[in-house]
């Protein structure tokens, strides 16, 4: 095979591999949106009183993020056609571990709620529904560990708000009453900031990739 042809094939393989990242591990602007939703859920849930309007907002945040993520992937980052990124063994095991943990929690809270024998309120039903939605979302869309951590908080904050609770924000009275929980909850906005930074970096990487793919497409059309 001539060297020129081999170089073109190597470049095409590299571009295809990079392009495929945006089907799974690279979210771009959708990661930025997910991080922003996580920060918003953390602050709103911990600082505002648990009104019905707030509960609706907190439930809408994870669902809005997932819909926007799917739309951006399909119509922007994979605009030249869907190419699925291949999972490595480590990524596959990590993802299965995350889904297993979410499934265990969903089963536990469901058994706990049903074992009381009392009539389930709307808040408890919504709580259980969101717990199981997290399992589905994690299996289908939250493929990277950072996506899963942020998505977990969004669904959990929405779920506990339906039960009349919220994760405490550092510096508030609620945080002073439960410092361990406040410190644990603080990990999620930090993860959100990391997801935003990664999303910005992925989006910047996509711009030259897109330009190169357009050039190759133009050359193929001209040929």
Image: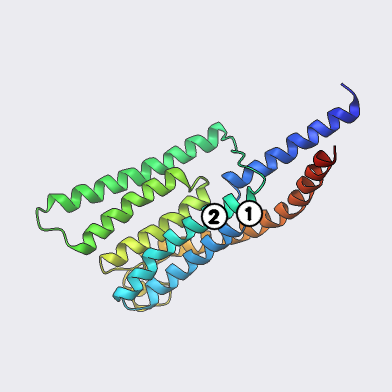
| Quarter of image, res 127 | bottom left
Percent x, y for residue 128?
26, 54
Name the residue tied to disc 1. Answer: 76
Residue 195: give its label: none
User: In the rendered image of this protein, does residue 91 appear above or below residue 58?
Assistant: above
- Viewer can see residue 88: yes
Q: How far from the left and from the top, in percent, is residue 146?
A: 52, 52
Question: Horizontal placement of 217 versus 197: left or right?
Answer: right
Q: State if disc 1 and disc 2 touch (CB < 8 Å).
A: yes
Query: Measured along the vertical axis of the image, is residue 180 above or below residue 83?
Result: below
Q: Nearer the viewer, residue 20 or 92?
A: 20
Q: Quadrant of the N terminus?
A: top right
Quadrant of the drawing holding the C terminus? top right
- Residue that mark 2 sits on: 71
Q: Nearer the viewer, residue 44 or 5?
A: 5
Callout 2 environment at 10 Å: few (<14), some (14 to 19), or many (20+)?
some
**Label 2: element kind:** helix
User: How many C-alpha atoms fall within 10 Å of the one at disc 1: few (<14), some, or many (≥20)?
Assistant: few
State which tag comes first along the sequence, 2 or 1: 2
In this view, 175 is above or below 202: below
- Residue 64: percent from left, percent from top: 46, 61
Residue at 40% over, 65% down: 60
Q: Nearer the viewer, residue 200 or 22?
A: 22
Extreme residue toward the front, this view: 222
The residue at the point 37 percent across, 78 percent down is 48
Toward the left, the furthest residue is: 117
- Give the residue at x 46% y 53%: 149
Q: Distance between the residues labelled 2 and 1?
A: 8 Å
- Please tell me which residue is depicted at 56% across the width and 58% down the height of the picture: 30
Does 146 sit left or right of 117 as displayed? right
From the viewer's side, name the closer residue of 19 and 181. Answer: 19
Q: Where is residue 126 in the image (x, y as percent from the top left)?
A: 27, 59
């Amino acid at each position: 095979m001539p060297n020129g042809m081999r170089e073109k094939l190597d470049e095409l393989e590299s571009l295809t591999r990079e392009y495929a990242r945006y089907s799974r591990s690279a979210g771009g602007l959708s990661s930025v949106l997910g991080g922003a939703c996580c920060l918003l859920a953390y602050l709103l849930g911990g600082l505002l009183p648990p009104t019905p309007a707030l509960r609706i907002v907190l439930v809408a945040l994870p669902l809005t993020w997932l819909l926007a993520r799917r739309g951006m992937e399909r119509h922007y980052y994979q605009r030249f056609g869907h190419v699925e990124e291949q999972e490595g063994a480590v990524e596959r095991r990590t993802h299965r571990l995350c889904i297993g943990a979410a499934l265990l929690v969903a089963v536990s809270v469901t058994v706990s709620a049903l074992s009381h024998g009392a009539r389930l309120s709307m808040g408890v039903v919504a709580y259980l529904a969101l717990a199981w939605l997290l399992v589905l979302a994690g299996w289908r869309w939250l493929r990277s560990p950072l996506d899963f951590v942020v998505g977990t908080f969004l669904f959990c904050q929405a779920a506990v708000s339906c039960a009349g609770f919220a994760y405490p924000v550092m510096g508030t009275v609620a945080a002073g009453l439960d410092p361990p929980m406040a410190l644990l909850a603080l990990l999620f906005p930090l993860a959100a900031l990391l997801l935003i930074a990664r999303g910005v970096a992925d989006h910047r990487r996509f711009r030259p990739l897109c330009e190169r793919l357009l050039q190759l497409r133009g050359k193929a059309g001209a040929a």
